[in-house]
Image: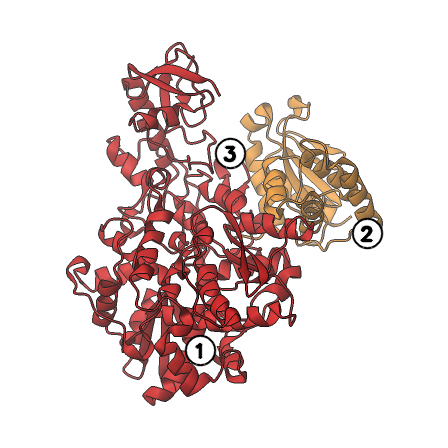
Chain colours: A red, B orange
Amino acid sequence: MADVTLKINGLPVTVPAGTTILDAANSVGIKIPTLCFLKDINAIGACRICVVEVKGARSLVASCVYPVAPNMEVFTNTPAVRKSRKTTLELILSTHDKKCLSCVRNQNCELQALCQEYGVEDVDRFAGAVPEYAIEDTNPYLVRDNNKCVLCRRCVAVCKHVQGVGVIGANERGFVTNIGSAFGLDLKDVPCIACGQCVVNCPVGAIYEKDDTQKVWDALSDPDKHVVVAPAPAIRATLGECFDMPIGTNVEGKMVAALHRLGFNSVVDVDVAADITIMEEGTEFIKRLKGDGPLPLITSCSPGWVKYCEHYFPEFIPNLSSAKSPQGMYGALMKSYYAEKMGIDPQNITVVSVMPCTAKKFERTREQNNVDGLDDIDISITTRELARMIKIAGLNFTALPDEEFDPIFGGATGAAHIFGATGGVMEAALRTVVEILENKPAESVDYKEVRGIEGIKEATYTVAGTEVKVAVVSGTANAGKLLSEIKEGKRNYHFIEVMACPGGCVNGGGQPLHDAYTRAHVDLKTLRAKALYSEDEASTYRKSHENPIVKKIYDEYLGEPGSHKAHHLLHTTYVARGK
Amino acid sequence: MGKSTISKIPFKGTAEQEQKLREFIAANKGMQGALMPVMQEAQEIYGYLPIEVQRIIAEEMNISLEEVYGVATFYAQFNLNPKGQYKIGVCLGTACYVKGSQDVFDKACSVLGIGNGDVTEDGKFSIEATRCIGCCGLAPVLTVNDDVYGRLTADDVPGIIEKYQKM
């Protein structure tokens, strides 16, 4: 496309035709504030924060949707622009509850930051009627508080376009416009997949995770409870961000130290369960490849994806791996293997998981996810909730020493660490499946074709003389596209990995929050994933089946992968849920 | 928000109505902006757009229920409830409004225990705030089906409703 040259604040700028003023300004380091804009996802010119002056234009224009033109003269910082943005903020505040002190997003709120930047002094300048909304919190994973909503529709756009779900939207009109589900239904009564992408893309505190930290505190202060905790693979790659550490810092050691200091009786690693997931799922794949069971086999680690499949593509339920997710396996093994080894009545064990994910709060409540009537997991908290606990406990996180997981269920392989990134589960599975099928050590453990943040990746490998076609998908809209094309006969695979969130768990709905500008200009997914791939490279063991702890658990307790006992504890079933 | 807007009146749609709607959608879904005409036709067929009907539209159009609902609640002409046996209209046009029709409307709502666009659980009364109905000389005006009541105060409302309750 032809280039266009214009002037922004007197500075000549050349960009391809069709570029918006916002992007053109960004390309030369001029930041224009935004609120409703979400790069590649939501550009609707609704909030009017990004207005700029264009010489000769009748009024200020919304730079996020206004395309550049040759010889255009743009001014992003004039008295008229500053006044307009400030007035817009004051108008937004006129229907905002302004209860910042008790807000989950206090000091991490895009509206609050803009108000400070533009010197909004009188928050009641346009005082008047304020719509009042009941807080929606009857589901186990998300809370909606429309008293804080700024109607930017970022959650709506992500839900519809990135996740292909579309269970929330703008209802009614004018003053009473509100974001919610059809007919005022709660998220638990519509086909919401609980992924939490609405949360990580909300600029304010209008939608957030159901906070379960009090339950953890209660368990920790109950002398009759033996409280076990374990973090998911992706937590170590992101938790540091809550303590202002650079994005992509692996804080595994400090995280373990913090968990010890919070008073948990045992600090173990979900990554060990991830290695066991590979043993179970890998065995299942080999079985199906040999004709016993439907192909493609599709991974079932991501509860948002599993729920998506149950709602939107129930015909693929037989393709889902019956293996529980690492969270589920961890819980089931704590209340069986661990309880037995430690000589503790499983009734007295409280199992806590730290997950990058709000859908894990849903997964925990699945009636299929228990063993002999005991829930696998008792409490599931997100990365953000753990950070909150660490802060309340007064731990100076960055100064903590590095500590190690308790050896009874710690010491995972590199294959397990990369579970947190899109492609990681597939790569981990291939490392094990290929060696088992070829019955010899593989030359390389790297399957680089399935790495990277593209939404749909595919690769073909020749394993023991057989062609194995795999696909890796993240973002459920991409999953929907892939499954539809499989149904139409346009694609076919033997093995598919799906993660509900774009980029996988490193970008999960329970992960640390960043504003839209950071999300647009910093490659969060790649940086966070890099922390996991580096840990993988530095690991002594990089294949799940070589993990000594895993071997021990099978030898002493489970028997073979896929054994009767393994099935009883580590496998689950799914249900069609309807749209 | 948080409050269900699902109609309390049991859905009485027939198989013929459903077939008619599905056929209309099949014939029109290819055209750009088909949702509005489809919803208008659905309201033509059923008289209103309850969740059962919106689900059919969402399924046939391959869009989410929320997308249909968002449009249904944006436009005042779409109804989530059937009309009552007695359709009460209160004009909130300029002339009626300055003569106090908001009080008349509020009174009617409180007597019936329903809000704008709703229908009573027995299906007898529905109420709607309307624009000017063209008899400003009688302001403020309330209509019940084709009957017109003018120059009202809020105190007149209970008597009017009682009259139809007894019919």
> Which secondary structure lies at badge 3?
helix
CB-based contact (under 8 Å), mark 1 and mark 3: no
Residue A283 versus residue A341 in the image, above or below: above
Question: How many tags in the picture?
Answer: 3
Residue highlighted by disc 2: B14
Q: Which mark is residue A174?
A: 3
Residue A317 versus residue B154 in the image, above or below: below
The residue under the point 54% across, 36% down is: A173
Give coordinates of residue A148: x percent, y percent.
39, 45
Q: Which mark is residue A204?
A: none
Chain under disc 3? A
Can residue A377 be seen here? The reply is: no
Residue highlighted by disc 1: A332
Neighbour tally class for label 2: few under 14, some 14-19, many 20 plus, Cα within 10 Å: few
Q: Distance between the residues labelled 1 and 3?
A: 50 Å
Mark toward the start of the polypeptide (1 vs 3): 3
Amino acid type at image mark 3: Gly
Nearer the observer: mark 2 or 1; the answer is 1
- Choose between A501 and A577: the one closer to the eye: A501
Residue A250, quarter of the rendered image: bottom left
Q: How far apart are marks 3 and 2 (CA)?
A: 35 Å
Q: How far apart are marks 2 and 1 (CA)?
A: 50 Å
The residue under the point 76% across, 34% down is: B146
Can residue A241 be seen here? The reply is: yes
